Amino acid sequence: MFARQVEGLGQPGDVLLALSTSGRSPNILAALRKARERGLVTIGFTGTRGEAMAASCDHLLIAPSDDTPVVQQIHLAIAHGICEEIEQAMMRGAPRK
């Protein structure tokens, strides 16, 4: 399912952020493989049991828990931090009026 979206929309240099608490979701793993084939940068977020994602990710964040709600809360907090950094970088590069 997600692999088709990557195939249709992904361009070399794009970034795919893949979240799988278990790290074993077949749809997520297929999307990561397709992203690699297409030249995307792959970033995975998973829990302590998600080592299966490592082979398909350029960068892998492993939340230090195997409790799904805890892993998801950690992923959410980190994703918000990443978005904040991107927003700040874009604002620094925006032309001033």
Image: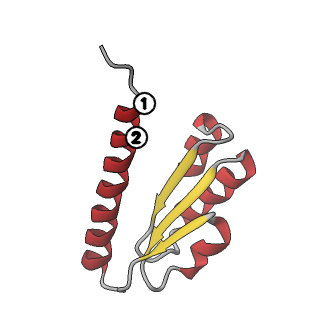
Q: Quadrant of residue 7?
A: top right
- View extreme (right): residue: 37
Q: Residue 20: horizontal and vertical position, in percent?
A: 44, 68
Vertical arrangement, residue 22 with respect to residue 40, above or below: below
Q: Residue 72: horizontal and vertical position, in percent?
A: 30, 70
* Residue at the spot 58% in from the left edge and 72% down from the top edge: 53
Q: Residue 58: horizontal and vertical position, in percent?
A: 63, 63
Q: Residue 86: horizontal and vertical position, in percent?
A: 39, 44
Q: Secondary structure at mark 2?
A: helix
Label placed on residue 25: none
Question: For mark 2, does the 10 Å Cα neighbourhood hold few (<14), some (14 to 19), or many (20 or more) residues?
Answer: few
* Residue at the spot 26% in from the left edge and 78% down from the top edge: 70
Q: Is residue 1 visible?
A: no
Q: Secondary structure at mark 1?
A: helix
Question: For mark 1, does the 10 Å Cα neighbourhood hold few (<14), some (14 to 19), or many (20 or more) residues?
Answer: few
The amino acid sitting under disc 1 is Gly
Q: Is residue 39 left or right of residue 54?
A: right
Read off the residue under disc 1.
93
Read off the residue under disc 2.
89
Taking depth in this image into account, of 91 and 30 the one nearest to the observer is: 91
* Residue at the spot 51% in from the left edge and 69% down from the top edge: 25
Quadrant of the frame with the C terminus: top left
* Badge 1 vs badge 2, beta-carbon distance below 8 Å: yes
Q: CA distance from mark 1 to mark 2?
A: 6 Å
Q: Is residue 11 left or right of residue 78?
A: right
